[in-house]
Image (cartoon, rainbow, N blue to C red):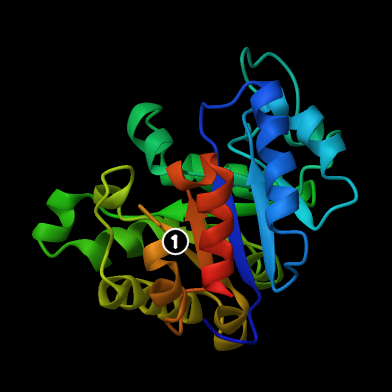
Amino acid sequence: MNKERKLIIAGNWKMNKTVAEALALVSDLKLDLANVREADIVLCPPFTALEAVSKNILDSQFRLGAQNMSENNFGAHTGEICAGMLKEFSVRYVILGHSERRQYQKESDALIAKKALAAHTATLKPIVCVGETLAEREANQTEKVLETQVRGSLAGLTAEQMTETVLAYEPVWAIGTGKTATTQQAQQAHAFIRHLLGKLFDEATATKVRIQYGGSVKPSNARELMGQPDVDGALVGGASLEARSFADIIKNSI
């Protein structure tokens, strides 16, 4: 973790939590994290709970994130949600290109780049996810995959927009599996991404961009992961669904 870059820890609730359950979780987090100001804390509930959570965290240090959005601004796109609709609920961040969407919804780097541009146009901050599968890592393709995804998913962004973008390195083989990249593996991937940003934009921009680690983050490994020089936070899945474990991850990271 670089002291110039403020830690950012986001909880991706995925397709979990009714409105009542979401409010109960937020209530517990408010108690557990009342005095924490050293990190940006982002809560990403499902679309159905955005309004209720938004009202509940209005006067707190928490920020609201969405789990996805359309690349389109309005129109005949059944089942989609656009940036303007998210802004109505004071959403600040939006997760784009999560590996689950890349895999199951077949989202391409080009589509993710369009979504990232749409997010910036609406002054939302995208959290753009990249990461390799186990087969790709075992074939020594990690850096090739990361370069392809980073270049493609950020295509068209200006250096200024890039500094307002968060990247999340998520080794797909570590998501929901209980496996975690070693601190060395995480740091190597983060350092590679930052070096690539320096080539795509410039060194000053690369130094400002926050890169999160995602993949079976838990209280027991948070401190070591966040202690790496290029790891600036975490995108937390399962462990963010329970107040104590999410709060402990944050407390152990700062």
- Say if 100 sits above or below 236 in the image: above
Q: Quadrant of residue 28?
A: top right
| Residue 126: image location, x then y, percent | 63, 52
Asked if one can make out residue 87 in the rendered structure from this viewpoint, the answer is no
| Residue 85: image location, x then y, percent | 79, 29
**So how many labels did they put on this image?**
1
Q: Residue at x 67, y 58 (%)?
A: 41
- Say if 68 sits above or below 174 in the image: above
- Give the amino acid type for the residue marked by disc 1 in the picture: Pro
- Say if 83 sits above or below 196 in the image: above
Q: Is residue 16 left or right of residue 58?
A: left
Residue sitting nearer the eye, 31 or 26: 31
Residue sitting nearer the eye, 249 or 67: 249
User: Label 1: how many residues lie within 10 Å, few (<14), some (14-19) or many (20+)?
Assistant: some
Q: Quadrant of the C terminus?
A: bottom right
Residue sitting nearer the eye, 127 or 38: 38
| Residue 166: image location, x then y, percent | 59, 62
Q: Is residue 98 left or right of residue 75?
A: left
Q: Is residue 132 left or right of residue 86?
A: left
Q: Residue at x 77, y 66 (%)?
A: 35
Circle 1 residue: 219
| Residue 127: image location, x then y, percent | 58, 53
Dot 1: element:
helix
Q: Residue at x 59, y 36 (%)?
A: 68
